[in-house]
Image (cartoon, helix red, strand yellow):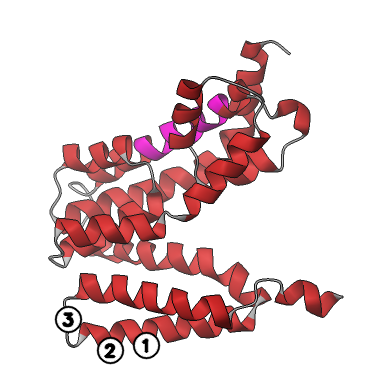
Amino acid sequence: MTRKQQYLCGIKSGVPVIFGFIPVGIAYGIMAEQAGLLAGETVAMSVFVFAGASQMMAVGMYGQGAGLASMILAALILNLRHLIMSTCVMNRMKPCGTGFKLLAAFGVTDESFALFTTEQESRATPWYFLGLITVTYTSWVTGSFLGAIAATLLPSILSASLGIALYAMFIGLMIPGVKQNLRLGLLVVLTAVVNSALSQVIPFSWALILSTLLCAGVGVFFVNLDEEEVEEG
């Protein structure tokens, strides 16, 4: 296939993601407005960061008065998984220049990673991935813009109700893993308990970071990610 055909195939594969990214992007835009960000700031975060879960966490922390350092550190911890995902994508991608790889790495999300790494080998090209992230990036920024605008038009009670989107997103990310691994579920509960306890004595933002790090350390020894495979064997 030509580069153009590879790019168009990537766009086609990314179309289903639009139906998830735009609604969540709208919810993020509304949350950001509720936290006190201007519409331009809300959209700029999506343009330059492009990480839905960490953006929603950051605006939630900002709304509760967290400092810049704690928001950056929390986002860094949450996005550490991108180091592994980017490595997998680059190893599978056919040879290309460093500049192209840097651009591609910016577009790696849970969704683009899943779609690209499960695609047939013949499509594992830089141009296919570029087409894929063109769709994911554009739909996320569009959703953020629509949310920022909608926040000023929707009734306040409806805007406030959409704040639950942050919790819904994290629950949605967590449930599949918890269903397959009971210990992982217990670790989630432990993290919530530790976070609640720490929040009583230190600022919420730092309680979130410390509880995440402490319980992640516990999880290294406590959670067996191959538990399901062992049981099936």
Q: Residue furthest right?
A: 233
Q: For the residue labelled by badge 2, is the local secondary structure a helix, a strand or a loop?
A: helix
Q: CA distance from mark 1 to mark 2?
A: 6 Å
Q: Position of residue 133 (x, y in %)?
A: 51, 32
The disc labelled 2 sits on which kind of residue? Ala
Return the disc, 2 or 3, that comes first in the chain's sequence: 2
Name which residue lies at 54% across and 25% down: 130
Side of 73 relative to 40 (left or right)? right
Q: Position of residue 193 (x, y in %)?
A: 37, 88
Please state which of residues 42 and 212 is positioned toward the viewer in this rendering: 212
Quadrant housing residue 169? bottom left
Q: For the residue labelled by badge 3, is the local secondary structure a helix, a strand or a loop?
A: loop
Return the disc, 1 or 3, that comes first in the chain's sequence: 1
| Residue count near mark 1 (Cα–Cα under 10 Å), binned few <14, some 14–19, many ≥20 | few
Q: Position of residue 7 (x, y in %)?
A: 60, 20
Q: Which residues are magenta?
A: 130-141
Q: Are marks 1 and 3 in contact (CB under 8 Å)?
A: no
Residue 159 seen in this snapshot:
no
Name which residue lies at 67% across and 25% down: 94
The disc labelled 3 sits on which kind of residue? Ile
Q: Are marks 1 and 2 in contact (CB under 8 Å)?
A: yes
Side of 40 relative to 111 (left or right)? left
